[in-house]
Image (cartoon, helix red, strand yellow):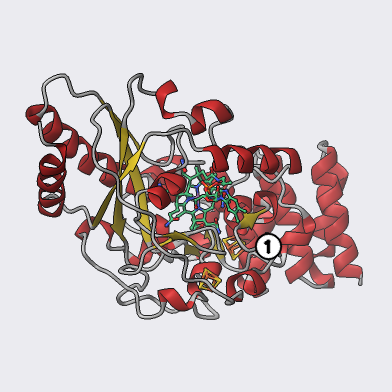
Amino acid sequence: MDFAVLKQEIIEYSKQIGIDKIGFASADVFETLKERLIVQQQLGYQSGFEEPDIEKRTNPELLLPKAKSIISIALAYPSKMKNAPRSTKKERRGLFCRASWGTDYHVILKDRLKKLERFILEKVDGAQVKSMVDTGELSDRAVAERAGIGWSGKNCMIITPEFGSYVYLGEMITNIPFPPDSPIEDRCGSCNICVDSCPTGALVQGGQLDSKKCIAFLTQTKGFLPDEYRGKIGNRLYGCDTCQLVCPENKGKDFHIHSEMEPDPEIAKPKLKPLLHISNREFKEKFGHIAGSWRGKKPIQRNAIIALAHYKDRTALPDLIKLMHEDSRPIIRGTAAWAIGRIGDQSVLFELEKALEKEQDEEVKNEIVKGIEMLKA
Ligand code: B12
Ligand code: SF4
Ligand code: SF4
């Protein structure tokens, strides 16, 4: 079988099924990535969301015996929301990052990869395939870089010349020896804007991220947000786009190719106060289909409280006081107490003192004390 011809057929088919860019890479061990992952692990820079087994992350043969090549796919997503509602003084709004607009991208890319798998399995007797998107063992970026989808930017993103960095990535390991594509040239040059613009200094240097400092990571944690970051997350409910928004390579890049990726403005930029008392069922119904709901409602509610504190929204005080007294979750009671301290004045001091008297949880007590100190100051 002529695999170069098959490759061409796959490229043609990929266009028909809504894949915006496709590239082919060898399934050789990812040696440089391996070294990099070891360093990142030693420095404590990993997020904990990635596959922990570095061998599996870097050796495709451990995932598919007889792996010969990897097909990398990229789908472009919108960077601008049509009819974005304004956040007003009366009704403050939070923001989900662009990678959480519209239908969860895992669902969309898995659908495309499934179609591609069927196409290949029909054409090649004995073909073996294994696909993954984000949650798989491989580094989607390292595969995409090797397959010539884009270069690895100083903001860590794979940047395509066509769509900028606003692309989702996925891949399929196969036992078919496709002729590989070549990596493309790095266009960052002397630019360092993303590194200089990161609000928390998480980009330690170009191409190296300390995940524990990255707002995208911090918005997804389930515990208390460390004090030093509470003032930095602004109105972000999930994820962070700053290092992409400032990138000159993303200037004017806004692609509305896939209707499933169109954001519903009331979901992607929701009102903050209603989020404070949303039920589990309502949360599932409204936000269950977006990528940003994978950690459940608690982190989103915690971030909504911090966002209200960021806006110093006094109209939220009654809701926050209720949460501090009545919510069953310590993270929510404590973050609400802290937010009351940020927003309120002496008139709500007694509420914090009352809460302190009856609170049993040490961490929450600590947050209430912080709130009281802020009010007294
Ligand atoms: C863990 C994870 C995170 C963590 C850590 C991110 C990070 N930079 O490592 C957190 C939670 C912080 C995160 C945030 C985001 N993520 Co994320 N995340 C992942 C995940 C699951 C693993 C990434 C990983 O292994 N990182 C470890 C680092 C070391 O490796 P890497 O970035 O994968 O690979 C590069 C480096 O190793 C580098 N490298 C290798 N050797 C060397 C040597 C030197 C000297 C240098 C300079 C570099 C270098 O080259 C590789 C190729 O670019 C991937 C999905 C997957 N399975 O791959 C998605 C993924 C990377 N995330 C993605 C997205 C969209 C985001 C956010 C933009 C979401 C948002 N808006 O909030 C942010 C961006 C933050 C940022 N600037 O990186 C996309 C990226 C798409 C793209 N165009 O690049 C991915 C690929 C998911 C997907 N399938 O589309 N994410
Ligand atoms: S996603 Fe935000 S916090 Fe993370 S590196 Fe980029 S700018 Fe910094
Ligand atoms: S902002 Fe500049 S340095 Fe950062 S990724 Fe974009 S081009 Fe590269």
Q: Is mark 1 within 8 Å of ligand 1?
A: yes
- The residue depicted at 31 percent of the width and 53 percent of the height is 74
User: Residue 160's spot in the image, x, y percent?
Assistant: 36, 64
| Residue of label 1 | 205
Apparent side of residue 53 relative to residue 45 in the rendered image (left or right): left
User: Residue 217's spot in the image, x, y percent?
Assistant: 60, 50
373, above or below 29, in the image: below
Q: Which amino acid does the dot numbered 1 rest on? A: Gln
Quarter of the image where one finds residue 5: top left
- The residue depicted at 13 percent of the width and 49 percent of the height is 17
77, above or below 171, in the image: below
Quarter of the image where one finds residue 363: top right
Q: Is residue 331 shown to the viewer in this render?
A: yes
> Which residue is more in the foreground, 348 or 93?
93
Q: Is residue 47 shown to the viewer in this render?
A: no
- The residue depicted at 45 percent of the width and 49 percent of the height is 141
Could you tell me which quadrant the C terminus lies in? bottom right
> Which residue is more in the foreground, 238 or 213?
213
310, above or below 299, in the image: below
- Mark 1 Cα shell of 10 Å, populated few (<14), some (14-19), many (≥20): some
> Which residue is more in the foreground, 305 or 128?
128
Apparent side of residue 44 relative to residue 209 in the rendered image (left or right): right
Q: Circle 1 sits in a helix, a strand or a loop, which is it?
A: strand
> Which residue is more in the foreground, 252 or 306?
252
- The residue depicted at 16 percent of the width and 19 percent of the height is 126
User: Residue 356's spot in the image, x, y percent?
Assistant: 85, 48
**Ligand 2 position by quadrant:** bottom right
User: Residue 270's spot in the image, x, y percent?
Assistant: 44, 64
99, above or below 365, in the image: below
